[in-house]
Image (cartoon, helix red, strand yellow):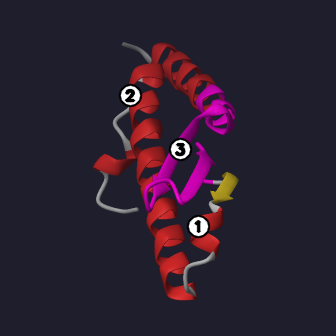
Amino acid sequence: MDLKDIMKQAGDMKEKLEEFNKNLADIRVEASSGIDMVSVTMDGNGMIVKISLSDVLLKEDKAVQESLIQAALNDATKKVKEKVAEKQKSLIGLPSMMDFPFK
């Protein structure tokens, strides 16, 4: 393998990474807590697309509301990380960022 081949591979990898990053916003995950009292939809960039709160939850005290919202958000975040790692491995053949010792 010569320098020309290495440079071509680097260019190909850059294109794959750019495509992957563009597609992150299209990834959607849903998570819920409290028997669907809280429902969260999050995209692959970790941005919240939608939050739904049931009328039953709104009658609960603040601590219960906060706890269930936190649980749903944490679950959605976990699902996004897993989904992105799965896509990362299948689309571009890179190891998951979750495999690295930092977050």
Q: Image point 66% across, 56% down: which residue?
A: 52
What residue does disc 2 label?
89
Amino acid on which disc 2 is placed: Lys
Q: Where does the image place residue 49, in percent across and percent down from the top left? A: 70, 49
Answer yes or no: is residue 63 visible. yes
Q: Position of residue 100 (x, y in %)?
A: 31, 52
Left or right of 17? Residue 80 is left
Q: Which residues are magenta?
A: 19-46
| Residue closest to the eye, 96 or 80 | 80
Residue bearing mark 1: 56
| Quadrant position of the N terminus in the picture | top left
- Mark 1 residue type: Val
Q: CA distance from mark 1 to mark 2?
A: 41 Å
Tell which tag, 2 or 3, sits nearer the viewer.
3
Q: How many residues crowd mark 2 within 10 Å: few (<14), some (14–19), many (20+)?
A: few
In reply to whether residue 48 is colored magenta, the answer given is: no
Query: Is residue 45 in sight in this rendering?
Result: no
- The residue singled out by tag 3 in the image is 30
Point out residue 57 in the picture as x, y percentages from the top left corner. 58, 70
Which sits in the foreground, 97 or 24?
Answer: 24
Under circle 3, the secondary element is strand
Residue at 58% across, 42% down: 44
Q: Are marks 2 and 3 in contact (CB under 8 Å)?
A: no
Identify the residue at image location x=39%, y=42%: 82
Mark 3 residue type: Glu
Instruction: Classify mark 1: residues with Cα within 10 Å, few (<14), some (14-19) or many (20+).
Output: few
> Label for residue 76?
none
Counting from the top left corner in percent of width and height, residue 70 is at 49, 71
- Identify the image quadrant of residue 20: top right
> In the image, what residue occupies the spot 55% across and 86% down?
61
